[in-house]
Image (tube, rainbow, N blue to C red):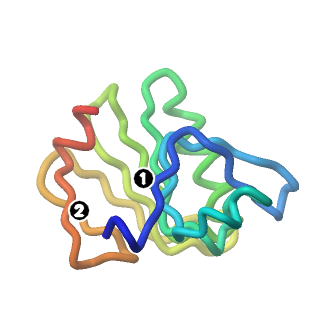
Amino acid sequence: MSQQVLIREGKPITLLISNSESEPDLAVVEPLEDEYFDHHPYPENIYWLIEYSYSSLEKDLEDKSKTYAFANIPEYWVANLRDQELVVFKEPVKEEYQSQQRLKQGEIQPTAFPHISLSVGYLLAR
């Protein structure tokens, strides 16, 4: 997977719909490193986003999920450190994700890479 993606930590992404930039904790994007010198990743370059959340939990679950769904980000994960659960948003339509799943343990497969399994416990222990 390391040659198929670039993991950007705390770096901006460009959301064209709102002429704004967001800085998710982790952005798993297409490995277009040279292009990112000219512009930050656009929604079509993004496989999924991850936010680690404790004090900003409501904002991450509500506001950001709507913004990312509207921008058509295919998948958005919130590591809820307060309740020790991973909230997984998928299938964006307008301002909402059609699928929301809450996991406290087990494995998760990103939609873009269904052959990869990530430990929920590992993600929450970060």
Q: Quadrant of residue 38?
A: bottom right
The amino acid marked with disc number 2 is: Ile
In the displayed structure, does residue 86 sit left or right of residue 116? right
* Image position of 25 with respect to 4: above or below: above
Which residue lies at the image location 33% right of the left edge and 68% below the top edge? 110
Residues at circles 2 and 1 in contact by the CB criterion of under 8 Å: yes
Residue at 50% of width from left, 74% of height from top?
A: 91
Q: Secondary structure at mark 2?
A: strand
The quadrant holding residue 109 is bottom left
Residue at the limit of the structure toward the left, as seen here: 106
Three-letter amino acid code at the position of disc 1: Trp
Residue 41 coordinates in the image, percent (x, y): 67, 61
In the rendered image, which quarter contains the C terminus? Answer: top left
Q: Which residue is mark 1?
A: 77
- Nearer to us in this view, 107 or 39: 39
Identify the secondary structure beneath mark 1.
strand
Are there few (<14), some (14-19), or many (20+) residues within 10 Å of tag 2?
some
How many numbered badges does the structure rendering display?
Answer: 2
Q: How many angstroms separate mark 2 from mark 1 (CA)?
A: 11 Å
Mark 2, residue position: 108
Question: Could you say which is closer to the camera, residue 69 or residue 7?
Answer: 7
Of labels 2 and 1, earlier in sequence is 1
Q: Nearer the viewer, residue 109 or 116?
A: 116
- Locate the N terminus and report the quarter of the image it occupies: bottom left
Residue 29: x and y in percent read 52, 64
Q: In the rendered image of this protein, does residue 70 appear above or below residue 52?
A: below
Residue at the image position 32 percent from the left and 76 percent from the top: 113
Residue lying furthest right = 19
- Residue 9 placement (x, y as % from top left): 50, 42
